[in-house]
Amino acid sequence: QVQLVESGGGLVQAGGSLRLSCAASGRTVSRYAMGWFRQAPGKEREFVAAISWSGGSTYYADSVKGRFTISRDNAKNTVYLQMNSLKPEDTAVYYCAVSVRGGSNYHDYREYDYWGQGTQVTVSS
């Protein structure tokens, strides 16, 4: 079992920045890919970013490429999402997830086995 706890969400003005953290416990996640997804009201959960177990490979949705950066600290069992140049359309609940099955389709939420409870990000215009 893996427990994931997100933090760092909040209210920010457009153009601002936030840094989300996702701390894992119960099991080391250093061998597994991890991802961030988000879900806005009335919309489906969508892929935001993912990172390989080593951190050597990262993947981003086109909508956040160049603005968001995913990283991880395996010594701390934590993954981060640095969000810059935030836009109102980034408003959503952000979830982190870990894939222990070893799949490679990082964009697909079905590849992930454990999820956090989510943290709200609200960007005002």
Image: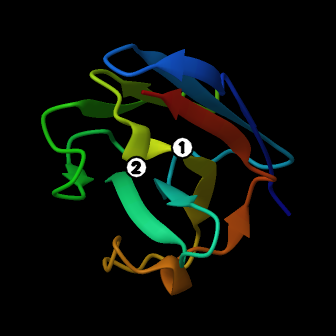
Pinpoint residue 57: horizontal percent, then vertical percent: 20, 48
**Where 107 sits versus 83, above or below?**
below
Q: Residue at x 38, y 13 (%)?
A: 16
Outermost front residue: 125
Image quadrant where one finds the C terminus: top left
Q: Residue at x 52, y 44 (%)?
A: 91
Q: Position of residue 46 (x, y in %)?
A: 44, 69
Residues at badges 2 and 1 in contact (C-beta under 8 Å)?
Answer: yes
Query: In the image, is residue 42 above or below residue 20?
Result: below
Viewport quadrant of the N terminus:
bottom right
Quarter of image, res 12: top right
Badge 1: how crowded within 10 Å, few (<14), some, or many (20+)?
many
Three-letter residue code for mark 2: Trp
Element type where label 2 sits in the image: loop
Q: Name the residue rendered at 54%, 75% in the picture.
A: 43
The residue to which callout 2 is attached is 53
124 to the left or right of 97: left
Q: Residue at x 13, y 34 (%)?
A: 66
Total labels: the figure holds 2
